[in-house]
Amino acid sequence: MKKMEVPRRTFLHLAAVAAALPAASPGWAQTYPSRPITIVIAFPPGGSTDVIGRILSERMRPSVGQSVVIENVGGANGSIGTGRVARAAPDGYTLTIGNWNNFVANGALYSLQFDLRNDFKPIALLSETPLLLAAKKNMPAQDLKEFIAWLKANPNKASEGHSGIGSVGHVAGYFFQKVTGARFGFVPYRGGGPAVQDLVAGNIDFIMNAATDSMQQARAGSVKAFAVTANRRLSGLPEIPTVDEAGLPRFYFSQWFGLWAPKQTPDNIIRRLNDAVVDALADPEVHSRVADLGQEIYPRERQTPEALAALHRAEIDKWWPIIKEANIKGE
């Protein structure tokens, strides 16, 4: 009896360990996702983040085998929706698309209830777009040089609309003043879409928002597009000169986009989501639609969590001191 006691105990111990293995193994997430995934867009519908989110969500559905739902939660330059995802369960079912506004500038603008550097887990770097400097249709200037001259001849009479205090358009406007010597007022909106609507209506004089926001209006001739803030022309709007060509050399700004999950989301879920994103971004139709919007998809080797994390750190290191020096504060 004594000889059989040890093997029996060993067998029972091994059986218990084996029973526990599926729960502890990374393979437990092979059933993910088993229900719809929500991508929170921290801005109103119609803006660049919303548009890229909807294109991505449509193409991700076949890869993940579930619906991918867009939910717009705007306000405070994207801080409200971003905070919601920071507090969400790290189970891969609540994600967000971050951009320069809500994942860089907000850290220098607000006393946030979450940590931009530590409360999120990067999934994939998606795309980027330069800004499009566009004016209302009845603006007397015909090009960027004439526009700058008009601004300087009419100090503090013009208004620039932007998608929130500390947004890329707001910061770009501040540096535009610094570089050109022009002076004008700022009008904040809850997103790029509403700013463009007011520009078309003639309620503001110009914008410097992500090109995605106003490309359709520029093509239709309902706004005057003077330049893109890049060193090469947009494939979707090739007739618009770069800032170098238009007379404001090296005035470069870009709005980039990345997909994020709450911190502590398991690595295998991050990998599953990254695979779905990479597959979506490889679709020629997605490439075409993104190009039509004035955005460029990052090369495959940069569509990684590591590349997004590196860009995020570099942008924070670059822009936080500049925003603080400018004394731009969130409202």
Image (cartoon, grey):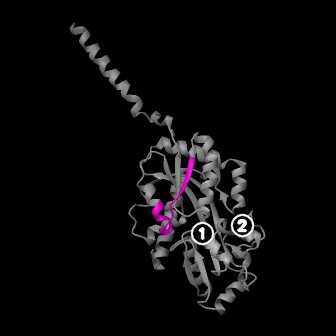
Q: Is residue 213 above or below residue 262?
A: below
Q: Where is residue 251 in the image (x, y as percent from the top left)?
A: 64, 75
Left or right, 118 with reference to 257: left
Please tell me in which quadrant of the rendered image residue 151 appears.
bottom right
Number of marks present in the image shown: 2
Observer-nearest of 34 and 310: 34
Q: Residue 192 carries which label?
A: 1
Residue segment shown in magenta:
68-81
Res. 248 visible in picture: yes
Magenta residue check for 78: yes
Mark 1, Cα crowd under 10 Å, few <14 / some 14-19 / many 20+, is: many
Give coordinates of residue 246: x percent, y percent: 73, 78
As shown in the figure, which amino acid type bears the numbered disc 1?
Gly
Return the residue nearer the eye: 95 or 130. 95
Which residue: 68% across, 89% down? 150
- Amino acid of disc 2: Gln
Q: Upstream in the sequence, badge 1 or badge 2? A: 1
* Residue 252 visible in the shown view: no
* Residue closest to the far left: 2
Up/down of 24 relative to 123, above or below: above
- The quarter of the image holding the C terminus is bottom left
Classify 10 Å Cα crowding around label 2: few (below 14), some (14-19), many (20 and above): some
Image position, residue 274 (x, y; %): 56, 46
What secondary structure is marked by label 2? helix
The kind of secondary structure element at disc 1 is helix
Query: Residue at point 46% right, 73% down?
Result: 321
Q: Where is residue 284 in the image (x, y as percent from the top left)?
A: 72, 49
Q: Which residue is drawn at 43% across and 47% down?
A: 90
| Residue at numbered disc 2 | 216
Would residue 127 appear left or right of 74 to someone viewing this image?
right
Q: Does the magenta stretch include residue 192?
A: no
